[in-house]
Image: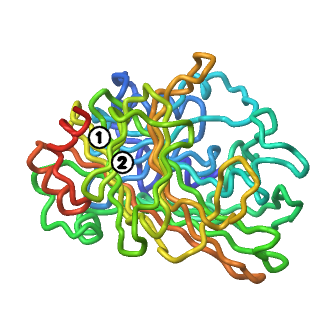
Amino acid sequence: MHYPLVLMMLAGIGCGTGTKSNHEKLEEQQTQAAGTFGYDLQFLKKYKETIVLTAADNPDARALINPAFQGRVMTTTANGNAGNSYGWINYKLIESGQYQPHMNGFGGEERFWLSPEGGQFSVYFKKGQTFDFENWQTPALIDTVSYKVVESDASSVKFQINAMIENHTGTMFVIEINRKVAMLDKEAIMSTLGLHSLDDCKAVAYRSINSIVNKAAEWKPETGMLGIWLLGMFRPSDKTVIIAPFSTQHSEKPLITDDYFGKIPADRLVVKDSTLFLKADGKFRSKIGIAPRSARNVAGSYDAEKGILTIIKYDLEPEGKYMKSTWEIHKDPYNGDALNAYNDGKLADGTQMGPFYELESNSSVKALKEGESITHSQNTYHFEGDRATLNAISKKVLGVDLDQTAVIFK
């Protein structure tokens, strides 16, 4: 499928004639180093139609979006083609051109998925199947189907797709999915995070607005509902730590799940002073979840090796219903997580998809009547600068001194 507006935007041109300047042609011809945004731009353009978005007030703040991968944000940078590329990309899988069983882990720092994954209302297990890995299958709708571009300009793109999908109970959903990704300028970055200045650091940020419209019969709690699930895959390092602040305002104790894949060792997970810290080195498979009544609407990570602070800010309803996704029949299927974080590691057979780590947010769900919709928005921010500058941002937004990340596991 061809998207004329998208073709005009390849290599970062905006709403002009589509003619590339000599500078842009030369820039494309230069081979960028692995780990840079330019390297990932050249790689993705080789295999898939790729949209380049640029912040309106900063040509160095860029994002790569792929319609073929459900409009996912593959990666971003705050420092142009030669800058760090923040998203984790599965080069081997994309280069192979072959689809994998169960799931195609193409990577990307924000992808659109549906919840729940497990339970009686799962859309990843067919009716009558047991919750075993052999039966687990990511729906094509959020795995291999290309999303249609319906609007685009130099700093934003909107996708839409209509589909039908059945859950484990046998309920058929007829839905319309809308997804818009838009770059944030410096003023928007500061206003959404309550910052006074970005003068001493490089920054890139974008907002995704995602909605599901019910196009058929009313959804009912007893037969299942659908939620929006946004997952971001990022590059790990030995000095990267996930930072997840939580609240006890709506619960007596923090509602945290930390045993998805067994107990996480104390030298990898620490809960202290209303903050959860999880190592994100891509060397030990571990996952945490925070329930909506304990979650805050922000989380992040700090890579002390490269000096990168990443933050996500997402819609949160503390008293809302959230789908539970563990692979079992649930007594309370609407008591799931609002926030998840994952550190990749080797499986029992010694294989590993990554390494990467993930920051994930979930939407609440509602019994939608025909024509009604749910919407879930998330902002993703990356900052690069000296430690003092990043520390000021972390304290303001996450309530955490970054010095803690260096000593928290000692």
Observer-nearest of 301 and 326: 326
Q: Is mark 1 on a helix, strand or loop?
A: loop
Q: In this view, does 397 lie above or below 342?
A: below
**Left or right, residue 368 beside residue 157:** right
User: Label 1: how many residues lie within 10 Å, few (<14), some (14-19) or many (20+)?
Assistant: some
Q: What residue type is labelled 2?
A: Arg
The image's mark for residue 377 is none
The image's mark for residue 80 is 1
Q: What residue type is labelled 1?
A: Gly
Residue plotted at (76% across, 46% down): 140
Task: Identify residue for label 2.
Answer: 62
Does residue 370 appear anywhere in the picture?
A: yes
> Most extreme residue toward the front, as rendered?
252
Quarter of the picture holding the C terminus: top left
Question: Residue 186: x percent and y percent?
Answer: 24, 62
Query: Is label 2 in contact with label 1 (beta carbons under 8 Å)?
Result: yes
In primary-sequence order, the first of circles 2 and 1 is 2
Does residue 61 appear anywhere in the picture?
A: no
Observer-nearest of 141 and 2: 141
